[in-house]
Structure formats: C-alpha cells, structure tokens
Amino acid sequence: MIQPIIDQSGIIHIFKGKQRLPIKLVIGEILTADIMDIFPTGTIQIKINNRVLNAQPQRQLPLNKGDTVYVKVEKPLSDGTITLRILSTNEVQQMQRNLSNAEQEISEKIFKLIKDIFIQTSQQDIYKKQIPDTQLDEKSHLNLIKTLLSLPLEKISDTEKASLLQKLIEVFSNRSSTVENLQEFISFLENKSEFKEMTAQLKNLLISDTDKTPEKMKQALLNSGPAFEAKLKQAFLEGYAEDANLENIKEDLKSVLNNMLNSAKSKGIEEVVDKAQKILRQIDGYQVLSKTYQSFFTFLPVFWKDIEGGNFAFKSFKRQGKEYHTVFVTLKIKKEETLSFVVTMINKSFFISFSGDSEIMQVIKNHEKNLKERFHQIGLALGGINYITKIQELIKQWSIKEGLISVTA
C-alpha cells in the first residue's frame, strides 16, 4: 500500500514508484477522473490531473473504460486508504450550476477591474467600491488584485474566457492605452530635474518603431511589468547569487514606477503620484489577465508611428506530440481603427490569421506577397495566411483547445 502524507493545509501527497514529484490531492476538492482501464480483479485504473492511479471500488459500479466521472477527495481512513467518492447525478448538476454562477461572477469582476483602470483618468475618480460614494484606496486596490489572483481562474470555461476576452479587446480599443499614458508621463517628467535619472530609465524600457530588433523587443516585453513578481521571487530563491538578477529587477518598468511613486510621495508631488499609480494599476490588470488565460499578457512597449497602442499575449504548450507557440496581438490604429492577428508556430511551421477593419485588411492583402517573401528569405516555413471577419474566431484560434488549427492560404 502507498502511504500518503498529509500536510497542515490538508493536501495529500502520494509518492508513487520512482517518480520524484508526488500526486497532490486536496481534501474536499472535486476532480474529474478518466477511467483508463478496468482489470479482471475489479481494480480500476483512473487518470486524475494527468497522473494515473489504481483504485479499488468498495461496491459494484456501472463504469466502463473511457468514462469520465466526478470524484470528491475525502479524508483518508485510519489505515491510510484514500477515499474518492463518486458524485451522484444530482450532485454533479448542482456543482455545474454553482460553477456556472461562479465563473460568470469571476468574469464580471475581472471585466469591471480592467474597464475601470482603463477608463478612469484621475486619482479622484479611479475606483469606487460597490458601496455608493466610497472610493477604493490603494490598499483596497491591492487587496482586490490579490483576491482576483487567488481565485480559481483556470476553472472558467473556454466559452466564458472567449467572451470575456472579446469584451476586453473592445475596452482596450476604445480607451487610452498604456503606451499613450507612458508617453504623456515621460513628457510631463522631462521638465522635472528631480526625476531626470528615472525618466531616462523609463525611456530605455520602451523602443521606437525605427529601432526594433528581436532582442530589444524581447527585453522590452519581459520588463513591461506583469512578470515582475515572478522575477522577484526567482531572485529571492537564488539568494541574489548573481548581480544580474538584481539588475533584471531594477530595470523592470514596475520597479522604476514604484521608485518614482515612493519618491513623489516623499516630496509631496501628487501629480506624479497619480500618473504613476494609473500606469501601475494597468500593469496589475495585465497580471490578472495573464493568470486568467494562463499566458503572458501585456501591452506592447513600442512607440510606433500611426499606432496608438497595442496588447500582446503569448503562451506555449505541448499537445499530441506537437509544440505550440502562439501570439495574439491587438493594435490600436489611429482614427479608431483596430487590427488583431494571431501567429502560431506548430513544430516550426507558422500560421497567421488577421482580423480588423476592411481598409486595413485590404492593405495587408495587398502586401501578402511581400510577407510570404520575407518568411522565405529568413528561412521560416509559412504554412498559411487567413483573414477572419469575426474576432471570436481569432480568439478561438489563440485558444487552440483541440490540438489542431485550421488555416487556409
């Protein structure tokens, strides 16, 4: 018998065979279990959280190979036996209703957060609590972010996530972008000598459309703020063994803005405090989106001619033996026009899908030949280019849940 270990938080750790990482089960949680096989002895082989276990049913159950059931993790018995109770039909239906209500509530909270931080323009009207005529101060804002980040965002259905992302794109397209706010902030700071060094740091974190290189773009994205906590945690884990770790944190946009914020507070310069907080809150919003979509989600830190701002989402995964790397970019063009596109690499073959206003789409179609030639010149395989009318279809392609992608040239 495998003897489980239960820690103080109620998590059961099961060490199976020679595998170094344990199987973790939380007492009280509900999981899906795939029936992998049923042996003549009555033992059932199940798959939970991508790990395989053998279970011994206590009574005869109408199960077949290939079935999926919901099980609840009960407290282990005195002899160490772990009990997985199969939920009844009524329990499953109630759970699904609860999940549906919960995911909608979570989506609404996320949408309200993002909408608020991109709509509001001054410290006096940035946030309001649900209680009328009460403002959300900085401490409450941070508590709200922590609450959203701690929610089980991975349990939101793909349909709900797609609907949420579509609404968020509309908000991003119709409100001031983070790049616009940074441009305004830098212009404001250039006349303040006490922030000269920090202003120079801000400029170095952003790149112009005439100075784009793959390495500069990569560094600008990684230092845009949403990954700051991850870098900070990594530096602590490594005990600041290398000076590069500290420098990496110091050069992050969130670090620079926090330093400006603290300095402005000590000097009593409220306008700097307000502008820095506004940008920091937008970065917090991107952090929530990164967690929601299990991806790296941020603004595009590039000053582009004729482009007012943009957002960037990236995720990488492996499925059915294939490696997927997919990027979702939304650009806000001047005159209230938008362009969105998804670039997906599947085992070194690229597929691109565009969606946007008809005039912009026609420009891209006119230059399609040039795009194909550029791919060919640098030795990359372009599998297909697709033009999509509805943004929902583009979001589905970025999600890639079936392990396949349909693209026509």
Image (cartoon, rainbow, N blue to C red):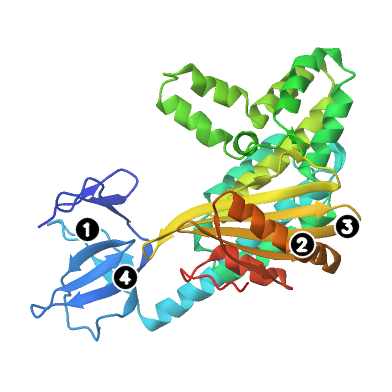
Q: Position of residue 44 (x, y in %)?
A: 18, 74
Split into 4 quadrants, where in the image is the N terminus?
A: bottom left
Q: CA distance from mark 1 to mark 3?
A: 59 Å
Q: Residue furthest bottom?
A: 62
Residue 388 locus on image (x, y percent): 70, 71
First reached walking from the N terminus: tag 4 or tag 2? 4
Residue 190 as seen in the image, left or right of residue 346: right
Residue 218, percent across and down?
60, 38
Alpha-carbon span between mark 4 and mark 1? 18 Å
Query: Mark 2: which amino acid?
Result: Ile
* Picture quadrant of residue 208: top right
Q: Which mark is residue 364?
A: 2
Which of the labelled discs sits on residue 76, or is there none? 1
Q: Position of residue 34 (x, y in %)?
A: 31, 73
Q: Which residue is mark 3?
A: 336
Query: Hey, what amino acid is under mark 3?
Result: Glu
